[in-house]
Amino acid sequence: MTTTATTGERPRLRADAVRNRERIIAAAREVFVEHGVEASLDLIARRAGVGNATLYRHFADRAELIRHVTLFVLGRLADRAEAARAEEPDAFHALRRFVHAAVDERVGALCSLFAEAVDPTHPDHIAASERLDRGIEELMAAARASGQLRSDIAVGDVMVALAQLTRPLPGKDIEVFDQFAHRHVQLFLDGLMAPARSELPGKAATLEELRRHKCGG
């Protein structure tokens, strides 16, 4: 009989272990946003309601934890893009719904925090990024086909704006800043609607250019 040892697969986690792992990742996301990527792992364990030993049993070091938080956020964003596309009959409303969901995920804060801490060439990161890219591309293509999205906008433009508009101001309470982020993102979305009210300088930002500049920041 084939065993885990011979196939190289990880053993299946028990349900309680899966819950602990999910709590640690969710707590780490919150703590990193509030205190930065050098935040105490002890604080993350306490926020998750687990012991330090449990945290280190799931994640060997800070770098591994950061990678999994990044994958968690990318996955949630992709889920939200796909749900908006499937559930909203109006194509621009679907795009609007996704962008506001990205604000709730605090992508601006996480993007700037993880820009130097995540290996963009890791296969898991590439797969998660490509899934999210496809989701956003489909939202924008549908909004463009409906005649509601101006034609001189690309995915990179949306991602740069999200990274900038959802990046908390120094010394500001993150919950208070979220309210302003939604207002400013709504103004940005109004500017995406067709017909265009002005000619944009430069050219639309591609995903390749965005990756080279690490989230546009």
Image (tube, rainbow, N blue to C red):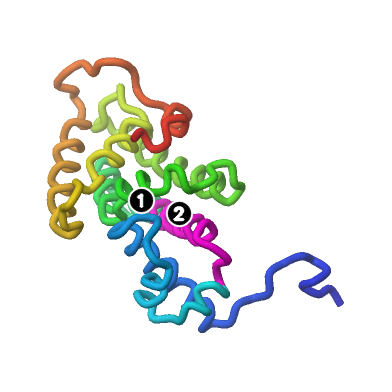
Looking at the image, residue 3 sits to the left or right of residue 159; the answer is: right
Q: Is mark 1 on a helix, strand or loop?
A: helix
User: What residue type is disc 1 on?
Assistant: Leu
Q: Mark 1 points at which residue?
A: 110
Mark 2 nearby-residue class (10 Å; few <14, some 14–19, many ≥20): many
- Give the residue displayed 37% in from the left and 45% down from the top: 111
**What residue occupies the far right of the structure in this picture?**
1
Q: Is residue 78 magenta?
A: yes
Q: What element carries label 2?
A: helix
The overriding secondary structure of the stretch rendered in magenta is helix
Q: Mark 2 points at which residue?
A: 70
**Mark positioned earlier in the residue sequence (2 or 1):** 2
Percent from the top left, x then y, of residue 124?
A: 58, 51
Determine the image quadrant of residue 14.
bottom right
Q: Give the range drawn in magenta.
A: 58-79
| Label 2, label 1: how far apart the Cα atoms are | 8 Å
The answer to whether the residues at label 2 and label 1 have Cβ atoms under 8 Å apart is yes
- Give the residue displayed 26% in from the left and 38% down from the top: 164
Query: Considering depth in this image, is 175 or 205 the residue closer to the camera?
Result: 175
Percent from the top left, x then y, of residue 167?
A: 25, 45
Tell me the quarter of the image containing the N terminus.
bottom right
Query: Considering depth in this image, is 134 or 48 the residue closer to the camera?
Result: 48
Looking at the image, residue 124 sits to the left or right of residue 77; the answer is: right
